Amino acid sequence: MTTAQRPTLEAVARRAGVSRATVSRVVNGSTTVAEPIREAVHRAVAELGYVPNLAARSLVTQRTDSVALVMPEAATRVFSDDQVFPGIIRGAALELEAADKQLVLMLAGSRAGHERVERYTTGRHVDGVLFASLHGADPLPGRLTRLGIPVVCSGRPLGDASVPYVDVDHVGGVTRAVQHLIDGGRRRIATIAGPQDMVGGIERLAGYQAAVTSAGLPEWVAYGDFTRESGVAAMRRLLAEHPDLDAVFAASDLMAHAALRTLRTAGRRVPDDVAVVGFDDIETAAYTEPPLTTVRQPIQEIGRRMTRQLLRLAAGEPIEPAVVLPTELVLRDSA
């Protein structure tokens, strides 16, 4: 009885009609090989059942084929009904699956979690790090970058311009949203702003301020933290301080959902008495009562673009240090 030999790199090369070196580059994740050749190699690998020796590959390439996605948030926030986090995770996972790499999800919502992430990533257990939802001028992304570890952030990092990032046009999106309210005759427009230690919160407030200032309107601001609970409290404050308001821009859809409910409880009709606009265009925005006008940001695409940038960095390829994706105003019945 004979034992079938395992397919070799040379056999894959013969089947694909390329050199052994080309097969090695494709199997080891190089993106420098032309797409048709990569497809031919992957097809030969599948037909022959070739299985790379992962341990040997790691020794040769000094890579783990794993990428960390770090969320500096509490688990209750990441796994809540805020669809921004699952969208980024899904986008990153799809890109890594296509590249035959693993995703390591790490939470860093506490000091201990932050220290654990630093130990794990500086120990070179992953080939690169994706940071999502940064708060404040977190020094870790910059420190890892200076150590030669590939890092890409979602959102412009505060305090360190050297770290590459993928973000969206917050200011432009909010300015269009508030201008839509102004064009509709609204003149007493309040905002439920996001946290001011996050670039999204800062820039969405800046967009609101630019629009109302340009129109000669007052600024009425209450602050939340992108959650429903904070949206309820902020909407109550705005109603108490400015009972004659006729529109609200909320810096997240969850806070806008809360504003809708709070206005209804207070006997205000939307949009007849008060128009409401959110930001994110999460799935449930189309199913609120009334359906929510909002600014759409391409959440899943953020995760995909971050991951593509990181893989290029890890392969030693040049990247754009700052990628800003467009936003879109989605008109529904709330405004």
Image (spheres, grey):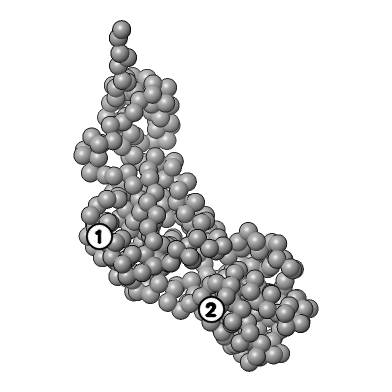
Q: Is residue 24 above or below residue 292?
A: above
Foreground pick, 89 / 27:
89
Q: Quadrant of residue 297?
A: bottom right
Q: Residue at x 51, y 56 (%)?
A: 86
Circle 2 is placed at which residue position?
224
Q: Position of residue 263 (x, y in %)?
A: 70, 79
Identity of the residue drawn at 59% across and 82% down: 234
Secondary structure, mark 2, is: loop
Q: Mark 1 = which residue? A: 119
Q: How many marks?
A: 2
Residue at the image point whose x is 39% and y is 35% from the top: 34
Q: Is residue 213 left or right of residue 46?
A: right
Residue 255 appears in the figure = yes
* Vertical placement of residue 235 versus 155, above or below: below
Q: Earlier in the sequence, mark 1 or mark 2?
A: 1
- For the C terminus, which image quadrant? bottom right
Relative image position of residue 223 (x, y in whole percent): 53, 82
Q: CA distance from mark 1 to mark 2?
A: 32 Å
Q: Is 214 or 248 nearer to us in this picture?
A: 248
Q: Amino acid at mark 2?
A: Gly
Specify the amino acid type for callout 1.
Answer: Arg
Q: Residue at x 25, y 60 (%)?
A: 119
Q: Which mark is residue 198?
A: none
In which image quadrant can residue 327 be found? bottom right
299 vs 265, left or right, is: left
Find residue 112 and report its horizontal and vertical position in percent: 31, 67
